[in-house]
Amino acid sequence: MILEVDKLQIDYQAKDGVTRAVDGASFVVPEGRIVGLVGESGCGKTTAVRAIMGVLAENGRRAGGRIVFKGQEVDAATTKRLLWRDIAYVPQSAMSSLDPVYTVGAQIVEVLTKRGNANRRDARKRAAELFDLVGLNERRLADYPHQFSGGMRQRAAIAMALALSPSLLLADEPVTALDVIVQRQILDMLRDLQERLHLSMVLVTHDISVVAYLCDEVVVMYAGQVIESGPVREVLARPRHPYTMGLRNAFPDLMTDAMELVPIGGSPPDLRDAPPGCRFAPRCPFVLETCTTGADGHSLANGHMSACRRDGEADLLRKEALDPVTWQRSSSFAAS
Amino acid sequence: MAGVAETATPTVLQRIASMPLRDPFAFVGLSIYVIFALIALLADVLAPMPPLEILFTSTGKLAANLPPSLDYPFGTTNLGRDIYAQLIHGTRSALAVGLSAAIVVSSVGTVVGLVAGYFGGRIDSLLMRIADMALSLPFLPFVIVLTGFLGASTSNIVLAVALLLWPNSARVIRSQVLTVRERTYVEAARVTGASSWRILFVHVAPNILPLSFVYAAIAIGWAIITEASVSFLGFGDSESVSWGYMLQDAFSSQALSRGQYAWFVPPGICIILIVVAGFFISRGYEEVFMPRLRGR
Amino acid sequence: MAALVELRGVVKHFPVARSLGEIVRGKRPAVRALDGVSFDVGSGDAVAIVGESGCGKTTLGRLMLKLAEPTGGSIAFDGVALGGLSGDGLRDFRRQAQLVFQNPFDALNPRFTIYRAVAEPLVNARIDKAEHKDRIEKAFRRVHLADFDRYFDKYPHQLSGGQLQRVVLARALVLAPRFLVADEPVSMLDVSVRAGILTLMREIREAMGLTAVYISHDLALVRYLCDRTLVMYLGRIVEDGPTEAIVRRPRHPYTRALVAAVPVPDADQSRIALPIKGNIPDSSEPPSGCHFRDRCPLAFARCAEEAPALREAAGGHRVACHLELA
């Protein structure tokens, strides 16, 4: 395991109280694997990744849990030393990681000389290599970020993240703002880089299709908690948590013949006032009285974890979840 | 104050009204204004003596250059006028100049900024070139020349200040309109068939109104300084007593060399107080307005 | 069925800032957002316009609603040219044609209550105030916000994305329009509420007999909503046909790449290489002839010389390609 996150808790201090954005999330990143961290906006996936990098927003703090990188427990101070050299980050908007007033080349050289202590000549050579690695012409090192298209900027941001040969790459929605064709090109490139450089990767996304295309493992988050995780193939083919089942049916799929969409009623809970028990319970068609009290379920089989309290009946529930009528049962169906 | 921010959505007016509670500087500024406004309203009660009345002592001599006393808290001028009465009545003219200039500046600036920003094109170019011209005029000489031509009345000073200050607010409001104009809900209003004027005044204007207030508060300070400067230089309205007039009077009668501090220090402090109060308030509104519009 | 919206040779150029050299040489560079677009939308049809950012699809939607004027060509609604509309004619058009926006968080005036926002079209259409409440309640029922009293006095920031998009939809429907344009209606919404909005849009269209144009980059979504799809590339239509046929048997090389690039939520999918190279060129300087030729794996000499016209192909398609594509 290159990275282990154990019962991580992150609080945000706001004017009107504390929001626990991540509440006891645990997952692991095996060496040389791509892990997809998937969930809706506000589920805590970006916060979790920022905590791994030790760069939480000013009002955020780690309230509990452990982060272990290559066998060493790290806190905010120690992770800062790992940044770039061991852990690198690719943000959603490459524009935000690239400074508009310097050429892209100058910025990569800056990382190499300031963080990596390379001399300028080696740094320039390395920058050209990096551009070649991500499929950009090295002549474009002399261009400014605004002269790049969205896809090229994302490639440049990836090149910069790889500058000091990190072993773990954290990518936050790296393809979300891109068109499908460019998105596909970037995903193919990430897979290629992972294999050639033997990288480990965490890919944060809201798009299950992107996870299906690129990732080996998936971690599904909902309302600050991990509700299901395991090998992608296994989780997508046989989801065991009703939320994951719901997501699978909730969006049109280009190639299947099933044309009925099944919406999940309601919307994710406000974390300042999270429901007791299972946080998906108010939207779940399979909710029982026991779901709204007590501790989470946690069942693990063949590396496939589910936090559903009715995990024993997962196969049955999955069958029922395919029927649209099932989802109209949940109490929040009327107003989504 | 989280309750205010989270539960009820305050209207523009509520936000403007609640701002001083959130910003201590704005609260101080507003308090200064309220005190001066009360003084101006109650001037005749606080200082029953007309400010230009020439006073005589009980022995029949001219009561000139008297030191501060219970009867004359700041003493008298070299012509035997009560400085305290002048200071109190000067508040009136200061507020009259400041508030009327603020109203003219912010209303002209807002309308010009709205029209130029929303309609764009030739109207925009024309209005903005006029604004550039107004901005390129040297401030004090223009005021002096204009009051020289039209007569040195308070209303002409207000006119001069308004002619010089509207472009500042018009330009900032225009740029804000350019931003608001691109918001989706403005396009939505067009799709639902709203006329341009309706979009401008119902959908766009309320979102830039706080900015008009910022410029109104700034204009108050500028107008009062301008009036004081013009009066100090002797181009003011000789019929009305203002703080600038008092400074000029004190200066030309050599009150400074005589060490008659009670004559020229109080009007100076009043000018500073009211101008600073204006800037405190505008700063407060800026903070309400600038950190993104409320909502998502 | 008769066409409700007809576009003929629609061209839209946006001027771009000129460099000093260009001013001296008298050049007027422009982004050619639309470069001769013609098609009809039949009454009651649901048509999708698909393409990547910069292909001109959003501009096209704005032109169809007279939110911008074309540089060339003509657009007619119900037989009347949009170009000449003003006053009562324009007001009448606004009553019949409505738009659903991509970003529901910005589509409602933050200072208006929900009730006032949905009443706005009625006010503008000069409908008797006595009728407002009835019509608004009806529109709220249509978008499944049946407990409308809960929403009327709220402000936009108090609602979730899904609720906001329902309100936006209610506002679009309150005048009972005939024509609806939806520009990426779910792309800003949480994944779990998207399906609710999509099923709702389909239901409403069928129930009200609306003619609809959906603008999206997402073929999967389009496949759910529309019978017919137009694929655009750099300001031109490259393929036009039944959605199912376009997804299953795309003919134009660009459409093939687009279909192949869509990720599907299936980990066992085959990972075929994309039949396309490079990036979209700058739309102020598209390639000569066929705009797609410099990225096309099948391009040949003629593609650089002559822009291919949209012509009939098998299966009810129209394809703009010089090759006879099976």
Image: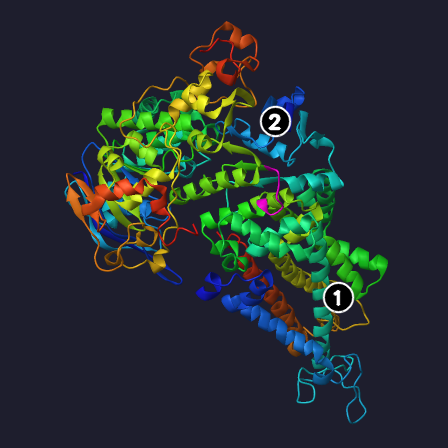
* Vertical position of residue C26 compared to residue C156: above or below: above
**B5 and A199: which one is in front?**
B5
Q: Which residues are magenta?
A: C173-179
> In the image, are marks 2 and 1 on the same chain?
no
Residue B214: where, in percent of width, then height? 61, 58
Q: Which residue type does callout 2 highlight?
A: Met
Q: CA distance from mark 2 to mark 1?
A: 80 Å
The chain to which mark 1 is attached is: B
| Residue C177 falls within the magenta-colored stretch | yes
Name the residue beneath numbered marker 1: B231
Residue B239: where, in percent of width, then height? 82, 72
| Residue C306 falls within the magenta-colored stretch | no
Query: Which residue is at 24% across, 32% downward?
Result: A233
Query: Which residue is at 67% across, 57% downward?
Result: C130
Residue C12 visible? The answer is yes
Name the residue beneath numbered marker 2: C1
Residue found at the far bottom of this picture = B59
Secondary structure, mark 1, is: helix
